Amino acid sequence: MANRLLQKRLGKINGKKNPKKNPKKVQKNANVKSEGKVVKSTELKWKKVDIPDTLGDFGGLYGLEEIDGVDVKIINGQAQFITRTDTNIKKDDENQDDIQIDENTGIDDLVEFKNMDDIKEGELSAATSESEEEEEEEEDSDNNNEEDSDDNKKDNINVGDDALKTNVFTSDVNLDNEVSSIDLPEWTNVVGDLSFTTLNGLASLAFTKPTEIQMKAIPHALKGEDIMGKASTGSGKTLAYGIPILENLLRTAKVDANKPIALIFTPTRELAQQVTQHLQKISKLIIEKNPYSILSLTGGLSIQKQQRLLKYKGSGRVVVATPGRFLELLEKDNTLIDRFAKIDTLVLDEADRLLQDGHFDEFENILKHLNNANKKMEGTAKWQTMIFSATFSIDLFDKLASSNWKNKKLDENESEMNVVLKHLMNKIQFKSKPVIIDTNPEQKVSEQVKEALIECAPLERDLYSYYFISMFPGKTLIFCNAIDSVKKLHSFLTFLKISTFQLHSSMTQKNRLKNLEKYQFQSEKNEKLGKPTVLIASDVAARGLDIPDIQHVIHYHLPRTADVYIHRSGRTARGGKQGVSVMICSPEEAIGPLRKLRKMLDNKSQHSSKPFFKKWQNTVPLLPIDLDVLAQIRERSHCASELADNDIASTSLRKDDVWMKKAADELGIDFDSDDEIVDTFLAKNKTKKMNKTMERNDMRMTKIQLNNLLSKPIRKDMRRKYLTGGLVNLADNLVKKRGHKNIIGHDEVDALATVQNKKQKK
């Protein structure tokens, strides 16, 4: 069976040019000693092979066709197709719809033979149709470009078959601002006239009405005014600046289809990816024509591929980037500086992060490059600047662990927004004084977030985390201050057979995105079964990340600053829904950092002359704990904690040995892991880790013990014997699937309802 593979990169195989060949000159070779008729590839009745849509753009693949009963011979470097039956040959009327191939394109450029052993250096090696062995095509060996694909070079191909489309990337976008048949009066009446493309995107995502920040910000943004916007987490800030950018993209495309429109900067890679996907979904009619018009540029991914994407026609008209990667791209290619100095809009998402030490330097260098290029362009106007965040209070950045905090009072006529604006205006050159839009001046944490507190001993955080997850199954996001804590808790819950995923800055970008996808998939599966799904993250996931339907946020550690607490808690209760934010802290933290945190978040404390005393405790209710259930899971927790400590310590010791051996090799000395370490710090660190490891037999016995404990269901009131006895017939509840799914005899409970009831009782 012969296979025909159509690619964008015609005339090249494995990066090497083939000699020019004219398919019209392929003739029957007199030396062919095989029965059958020699025909051209275009004369055969090729059958299209369906390829799943989930495979993306196939790295430049247009389609795959196959045919049975045809042999392939390579004679003098050219492919000969031999058929023993005329049923495989097209009739004259069918040949009219065949593929048109230019004179510079050879058959070898269009054909990939399933029964060929190898393709090297642009030449097709001899093969016969009887060969059954197949080898995979060699992969690109560039160490820095795992995700690079062959989409950086394209030639035009005219295809008669509708299934083999022309180069859609360079196609012009239909920018006609059609009269919309989509009825979204709450958008058009409040925001103004929007294009058909935007309304179509809003309707497809079921965004039937704008949020408060969108209603107030979009009209000003459409006029080109500078904006400083503050709104609660999950309130739709992305579309507040995204829709005006999309409208500008549509307006300018007919005039200049390559002109860059906007630069959007975010503090984290995940947020950049999320913003990009959100804008692409809302502008899907444009993306269908030009898939790279809205482009994400972040670290952790191939910079070479990003450089190539920026060279495509019409690519990067809207760029969403992290400052570090974008600065690196500018410094590698100075032409990009002149290109992006022509932008109309500059957006800083989560802009308050730039005010913190160490975060503004890269962005400041970008502004310097763009401003210098902008000044050289005569008649070029200054760009519009929009900055958005959920927090704009300088006080919120103070370390909660420090003891020198004092309640700072503002002047009566000066708001927090104005104070922050003064700081930003010293760093960012606005075109004019920004329009200040504050949709929640009296609130820092969204009112949709219901807060609760768990007080416990410092070494019992794992136990109470497991208790909460067992008692309130659902989608839970746990935040830790340290990456080691993320790894330990992930291992701990995994041993307890909880579906758990981790996310932290030590992971590669590819694995971080993969874990987010796995978390989403597993949570949908577990929701039907009533099982919990947990994502454990460092603060890399605290800002802007929109993970749908997070029900609970647990602060395994109190955050270091109040603004981080606000953004962490904002991962739940998004899109108008309600959620729960639970803090786990020791009694020492409760009278120190926690008290300071509640003072900062209090609505009236910053403007009130009355003493605050200890009334802040009333704002956060203690989460009710079922001590009977807690006692039953304590032994499970202890076993899982020992196994997790052993797992983490063993992994760390192996990494230390590898690092020490590598360092010794570089110094040219011998190293044995059993040698005594001279350095005091390293010796203590190794001893500490060794103390947490277990003998193999002990580890095996502990696993058996834990599995036995997990096999026994948890029962309310320690009821061990008769399911039909007592006031409640447990057997009847089990048969009828009533009550708690994980705890026999316990009523089904909801964390949100529990916290709300507790607060009402107070």
Image (cartoon, rainbow, N blue to C red):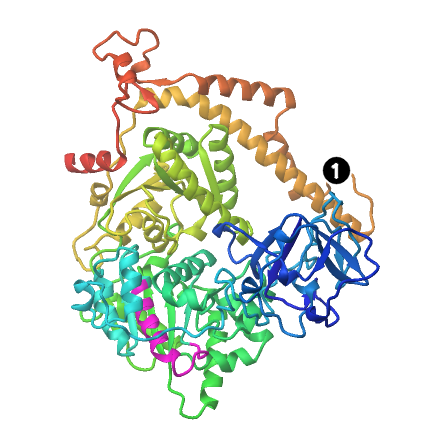
| Number of numbered tags placed on the structure image | 1
Give the image location of residue 188, x and y in percent: 19, 68
Position of the C terminus by quadrant = top left
* 660 sits left or right of 204 in the view: right
Extreme residue toward the bottom, this view: 378
Q: Quadrant of residue 271?
A: bottom left
Residue that label 1 marks: 673
Residue 513 vs 499, above or below: the answer is below
Q: Quadrant of residue 206?
A: bottom left
Question: Viewer-proximal residue, 213 or 137?
Answer: 137
Q: Is residue 392 visible?
A: no
Magenta residues (range):
239-260
Residue appearing at x 37%, y 20% in the figure: 631
Question: Viewer-proximal residue, 551 or 206?
Answer: 206
Residue appearing at x 29%, y 59% in the figure: 236
Asked if the stretch drawn in magenta spans residue 487, the answer is no
Residue 15 vs 619, above or below: the answer is below
Asked if the stretch drawn in magenta spans residue 241, the answer is yes
Q: Is residue 244 visible?
A: yes
Q: Secondary structure at mark 1?
A: loop
Residue appearing at x 57%, y 36% in the figure: 648
Give the image location of residue 739, x and y in percent: 26, 23
Amino acid type, label 1: Ser
Residue 689 vs 19, above or below: the answer is above
